[in-house]
Image: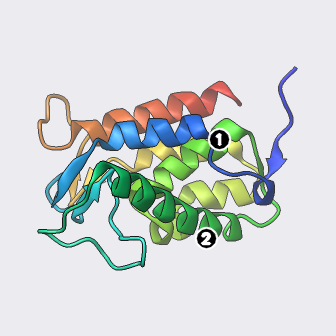
């Protein structure tokens, strides 16, 4: 018997998901543009500082500050994520993978996403399928076989999709 879904308002990112998220992002002490066309990130993939300022090239951090920055970023994103899913219930694993998506793409993209639209309508498998639509960076299709530009973007989407379908 599958565990019941829980209202999004009652969930938060699990510690395991936080570790997975920052592991995927990797650490850099100086701001970089991870893939062409992306925003500058620093620390553990943070695009914003704790005070909400956007990361700019030349910004630096330490491992401890990077963890604090990532936590502050996720906390802000979680509040917006929950507000955009009124009355929706998810499994913890779904919540975690969608928050991982939001950390990568932002709540602005989440608000307009077909993933969110499907969740609001209770179409969970369709929401999982929509994860695979997010494979482009700066107009380039990251699912292109053999690409060296952004293959990690596509690999991450495939992983999210697989995890999502496992709980359907």
**Residue sticking out furthest to the top:** 1
Q: Quadrant of the C terminus?
A: top right
Mark drawn on residue 94: 1
Q: In terms of image quadrants, where is residue 82?
A: bottom right
Q: Counting other residues with Cα less than 10 Å from the Cα at mark 1, is it few (<14), some (14-19), or many (20 or more)?
A: many
Image coordinates of residue 123 in percent, x first then y, are: 72, 47
Q: Residues within 10 Å of mark 2 (few under 14, many from 20)?
A: some
Whole-percent x, y for residue 98 in the image: 56, 49
Q: Quadrant of residue 55?
A: bottom left
Is residue 34 shown left or right of residue 166? left
Task: Please name the residue shown 31% across and 49% down the image.
Answer: 63
Q: Residue 80 shows which numbered tag?
A: 2
Nearer to us in this view, 121 or 95: 95
20 or 82, nearer to the observer:
20
Q: For the point 83% across and 62% down, which residue is it?
A: 87
Q: How is the image coloured?
A: rainbow
Residue 85 visible to an observer of this rendering:
yes
Residue 125 in view: no
């Amino acid at each position: 018997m599958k565990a019941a879904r829980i209202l999004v308002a009652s969930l938060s990112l699990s510690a395991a998901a936080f570790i997975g998220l920052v592991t995927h992002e990797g650490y850099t002490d100086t701001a970089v543009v991870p893939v062409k066309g992306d925003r500058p990130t620093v620390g553990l993939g943070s695009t914003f500082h704790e005070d909400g300022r956007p990361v700019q090239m030349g910004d630096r951090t330490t491992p401890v500050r990077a963890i604090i920055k990532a936590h502050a970023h996720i906390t802000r994103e979680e509040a917006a994520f929950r507000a955009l899913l009124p009355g929706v219930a998810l499994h913890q694993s779904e919540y975690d993978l969608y928050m991982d998506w939001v950390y990568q793409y932002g709540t602005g993209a989440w608000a307009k996403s077909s993933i969110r639209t499907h969740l609001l309508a209770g179409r969970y498998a369709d929401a999982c399928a929509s994860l695979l639509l997010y494979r482009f960076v700066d107009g380039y299709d990251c699912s292109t076989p053999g690409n060296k530009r952004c293959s990690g973007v596509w690999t991450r989407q495939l992983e999210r999709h697989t995890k999502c379908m496992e709980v359907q």
